Image: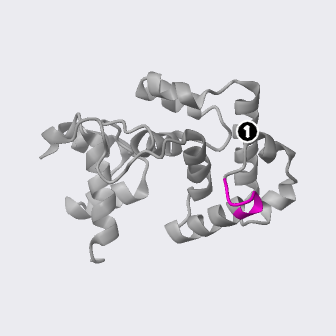
Amino acid sequence: MLDDVGGEVPGWTPSGDPYGAVIDAIVSQQLSVGAARAILGRLEARFGGRVPTPREVLEDDPDGLKSVGLSWAKVRSLQSLAEHLERGTLDLAALGALDDDAAVAELSRVKGIGEWTAQVLLVTELGRPDVLVAGDLVIRRAVERGWRLAGLPSRDELYALAEPWRPYRSTACALLWRWMRTSPVA
């Protein structure tokens, strides 16, 4: 079944807009899908129905950005992203040429983007086939539930358990995310 997956992760078609995907990832951190969509919609409405450019983020009033429902930490993260892009210290188009670890390190230079956000972007936007998003609570809960574990697996336990999933760990994550979204709560 997984042999015909190729380089794409089932369930995601890259947007072709890495900047917009990073904005979406920042806004979505630690929020439900519905809350994140509402805030992203208000952010886009503030800028004429589109994602603001890096320059617009930097020129906008931080209180105005916060007024759409962003936390101060997310406002600072958007500003950090915009600063890196404006200075040329981050090239989102070049991420595709980097290996997974280097791409995570590059993205993590932006304040507020950590390993989880970077890995999710590798899976959903860059279509990387073998990324295990080990820090994702939904993935950890899915493994706990599916493998009938007594508690949430640690990162090390999850990496060990997921070793047989290579080289399709991104696909496994996508399937576990989908399973948790569609299965009844036990």
Quadrant position of the C terminus in the picture: bottom left
- Is 60 left, or right, of 13 in this rendering? right
Task: From the top left corner, tell me how far across and down residue 27 is, in percent.
Answer: 62, 56
The answer to whether residue 151 is seen in the rendering is no
- In the image, what residue occupies the spot 34% across and 59% down? 177
- The image's colour scheme reads one colour
Name the element at disc 1: helix
Q: Nearer the viewer, residue 113 or 48?
A: 48
Query: In the rendered image of this protein, does residue 15 appear above or below residue 129?
Result: below
Q: Nearer the viewer, residue 169 or 6?
A: 6
- Is 169 left, or right, of 38 in this rendering? left
Q: Is residue 46 magenta?
A: yes
- In the image, what residue occupies the spot 36% across and 36% down? 128
Task: From the top left corner, tell me how far across and down residue 121 is, in percent.
Answer: 48, 43
State the residue position of label 1: 82
Residues drawn in magenta: 45-50
- Is 38 left, or right, of 116 in this rendering? right
Task: From the top left corner, tell me how far across and down residue 45 is, in percent.
Answer: 71, 64
Q: Amino acid at mark 1?
A: Ala
Q: Is residue 26 magenta?
A: no
- In the image, what residue occupies the spot 31% across and 50% down? 173
Total residue callouts? 1
Q: Nearer the viewer, residue 48 or 103?
A: 48
The answer to whether residue 117 is seen in the rendering is yes
- In the image, what residue occupies the spot 37% across and 39% down? 127
Can you tell which quarter of the image residue 112 is in? top right
Can you tell which quarter of the image residue 5 is in? top left
Q: Nearer the viewer, residue 9 or 32?
A: 9
Task: From the top left corner, tell me how far across and down residue 132 is, in percent.
Answer: 34, 41
Characterize the magenta stretch by its predominant secondary structure: loop
Neighbour tally class for label 1: few under 14, some 14-19, many 20 plus, Cα within 10 Å: many
